[in-house]
Structures are given as C-alpha cells and as structure tokens.
Image: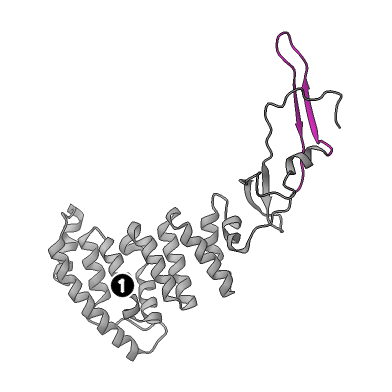
Amino acid sequence: MRGDEDFAEIQDQNMPIEHFVDLDGQLIIKELCYDEESETMPADLTETVESGELDDEDYEGYMGNEAGSLKRWYRRTVLLIWPSWSKYTIKHAAVNGFKKACEDFLEVTDAKEQRGIAEHVLWKASSDPKLAAKTLCELANRLKDVGLWERAVKECAPRTALSTVDEQTKLWSIEHFGFDALKESFEIMLNHEKHSSKKLKFLNNLGGAEPWEPLETDAEREAAEHRAVRTWAELKKEEVPKNLVKPTVGECSVLLKALHGK
C-alpha cells in the first residue's frame, strides 16, 4: 500500500527479471539480462509497472543532516517471448546450460530440434570443446550429416586435437560417412596434436594390420574402408619423424614402440 510520502528525487531505479522458469516451473536462470529500451512490451514497461500498486515500501525519515530515503518495490509476473532462432540460447542460459544442451540432444528425436541444439552447442563450443565435439559428432552420425561432423572438428580440434572424439566414435563415423569424406577432418585433428607419441599411437591403432570389427556395416565394406585408412595412416606415419618435438620422459618408450609399429 502506498504511503503518504513521495519522491522528491529518484536516485536509482532498476527492473531485473528474476527467477526465469519454464512452463513446468523448472528454474532456467536466476536473473535474465535484457535491453529495457528495446525488448519490452509495452515499451514503457517500467512506467507501466510503477503506475500500479506497489508490493512493498521502506521509508526512513530525516535524521539530523541526513536526508530521508524512500524505497518501493513492484513485483510482477512477465511472459518471455523470443524468436525461434534463439530458443536454445535462452533455454540454456544458466551456468550449467551448456552441459544441459549437450544432454538434451540424447532425448530429442525431432531432427529440426536436434539441429537447433547443434547450432547452440557450436556457438558455445569454447565452454567445453571436448564435450561439444562428442555431442556434435554423435549427433552428426545420427543425422548422417557429414557437414556437421566437419564443422565440429574445425571448431573444437584447435583445443582438443586427437582427443576431439574417442576411438569408437572415429570408427563409427568412418562406417557412416566413408573415410574419404572424413580424411580432411582427421588431418585437422592430427595437425593440431602436439605430441608425436600420440600421433603415432593414433595412426598405428587406426591403420592396424587387421580391419576393425564392423559396427553396423558388412565386413566387405569395412575391409575396403580399412585399406583406405591404412594407406593414409602409413603416409602420415612417415611424416611424423620429420616434425618431432622434444618428448617428455614418459613419452619416450611409447614413442619408440610406436615408431617400430609394435
């Protein structure tokens, strides 16, 4: 209820949007940033709110030479509306929002929804490049979208190198897309790897003497892909000694074994 006092001068005024929840009442973010000048309806939202009933008031009268102070609070529920292209940016705005976005794609079956999540994860990939790459490459396999795989590697590999995706995902992706389609991405990961021992271990594992067990396709196709991978791996192994960096003590034995193909 409004008291008898009123403002002689307003020194500070703010209108935060707090406790942003979804339709199920689940907290998305404690406080949402917005542009008060251009992102509210009505445009004069602050004035509209303050023209209504206040929820709380605190008045401290004059004390000696100190001027009195008057504070008023207005609490309202607002509905947030945003364009579809920013859906996942808004939905995953919380501190742990990026991780939540990476988990969400596992539960989403609609391809359009999955691609929306993918764009958000790509945009925020620097938050956790390894998690981003894992999410995006798995999603690329589901959607059979080699372009998404390539974008994920280009975005994440500068920070994660050969650990961008695990070995199983690499093999699974070769089955889905074929090695020729992934060769450039594999070279990007290899070129960003600083440790020679890891390069050689990766190339020996990928281009081993025997084809890997097919995960989804037939053995004949897998053998053909393996031959292509092995040819590429042997050529890349020849390049590694030409660009050796000083190994750590722990890498020496691994490096020697890898160089001998053991």
Relative image position of residue 248 (x, y in whole percent): 19, 53
Q: Is residue 176 magenta?
A: no
Counting other residues with Cα less than 10 Å from the Cα at mark 1, is it few (<14), some (14-19), or many (20 or more)? some
Q: Is residue 140 above or below residue 32?
A: below
> Going by the picture, which residue comes out furthest to the top?
64
User: At 73% from the left edge and 8% from the top edge, which residue is drawn?
Assistant: 64
Image-based side of 104 in relation to 172, left or right: right
> Going by the picture, which residue comes out furthest to the bottom?
220
User: At 44% from the left edge and 61% from the top edge, which residue is drawn?
Assistant: 132
Relative image position of residue 247 (x, y in whole percent): 17, 55
User: At 72% from the left edge and 47% from the top edge, which residue is drawn?
Assistant: 43
Total marks placed: 1
Secondary structure beneath dot 1 equals helix
Image-based side of 117 in relation to 126, left or right: right
Dominant SS type (magenta): loop
User: At 18% from the left edge and 75% from the top edge, which residue is drawn?
Assistant: 235
Relative image position of residue 91 (x, y in whole percent): 61, 57
> What residue does disc 1 label?
184
Q: Nearer the viewer, residue 256 or 159?
A: 159
| Quarter of the image with the C terminus in it | bottom left
Image-based side of 248 in relation to 110, left or right: left
Q: Is residue 94 above or below residue 137?
A: above
Relative image position of residue 137 (x, y in whole percent): 43, 70
| Quarter of the image with the N terminus in it | top right
Q: Nearer the viewer, residue 49 or 29?
A: 49
Q: Amino acid at mark 1?
A: Glu
Location of residue 194 (image quadrant): bottom left
Highlighted range, magenta: 52-77
Q: Is residue 63 magenta?
A: yes
